[in-house]
Amino acid sequence: MGTAERVLAYGGGWLDRAGPLRTDPTRLGELFAEPTTVLLAMWRDRCLVDGDGPVRLSAERAALVRSAAGETVFLGLDAEVAVFAADLSDLPERSALELAGAVRSVDVRALVGRLEPGHAAVQAYARGLLHWHRQQRFCGTCGAAAVTGGGGHLRTCTGAECGRLLFPRIEPAIIVLVEAPGQSGCLLARHAGAAEDAYSTLAGFVEVGESLEDAVRREMAEEAGVTVTDVTYQGSQAWPFPAGLMVGFRATATSDEVRVDGEELLEARWFTRAELRDRVASGRSLGRVDAIDHRLLTDWLAEG
């Protein structure tokens, strides 16, 4: 296993997802009514927070929130305590805050440094699942309305001749640390829309009929004109913003020639470990601190 698997943000969630309970609506109703049950409140992909962090509602307030929620989903069990999430996106933001007893709404990614990894994982899980429900209200095959089931992990088309089962979609993407021949440097790129001196590793979505390793080779060739070998898995990270799964790799370039596409990438160049250490010393981050590219880069830097 690659070193990138160590405690990445949005992974390592401590919930038992309790899949068998999803098919028992009676038991889920009983669980929701228990006084110890916890409800997480979200509004348009944002956590509702008070002075202590994301609000965790129980008992009477949870029942009120559920009655106003567009969707309420079962996330799983924290030991014997059931955990649900409710989407208040249909309400104005102020109304959602007041109902949940929150003071503001915050993106999960802005909270990750303040939360234990497991708590961040649960918040991201709730965000991703509720986002999917808002985007999948109708069947993509026949256009009929789709209704929620499976504790919020399934929607079913109501079309008389269709009845298609719809599951939350996952969008896999590869993210790659490319080493120069002889391991003398790594390839970083400036993406379209990025700041003048903002460099990161290369990434791209996996296409239909393509293995993860094939996606690595294709994306590196298309975006940076680099042919790579020795494609090695490093780890993966949940990235529900809105539905990603980031799969980290390391690969070795067959030459140091770089030719960017000029569309997704504006420039790309090789960085030595000394240059990256200088960037860190000057206060610049190696990628997003909550993302797997940061781990790929820091691991590579530590090897030197």
Image: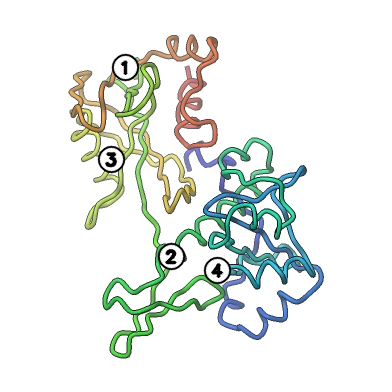
Q: Label 3: which residue?
A: 216
How far is mark 3 from mark 2, CA to CA?
25 Å
236 relative to 251 in the view: left or right: right
Residue at the spot x=74%, y=55% of the render?
101
Residue 171, relative to residue 155: is it above or below? above
Q: Label 4: which residue?
A: 70
How far is mark 3 from mark 4, CA to CA?
39 Å
Disc 1 to disc 4: CB gap under 8 Å: no
Q: Amino acid at mark 2?
A: Pro
Residue 67, relative to residue 47: is it above or below? below
Q: Along the line of sight, which residue is nearer the eye, 79 or 194?
A: 194
Which secondary structure, mark 1?
strand
Query: Which residue sits furthest bottom?
Result: 160
Mark 1 residue crowding within 10 angstroms, few (<14) / some (14–19) / many (20+) = some
Q: Earlier in the sequence, mark 3 or mark 1?
A: 3
Residue at the spot x=30%, y=46% of the render?
205
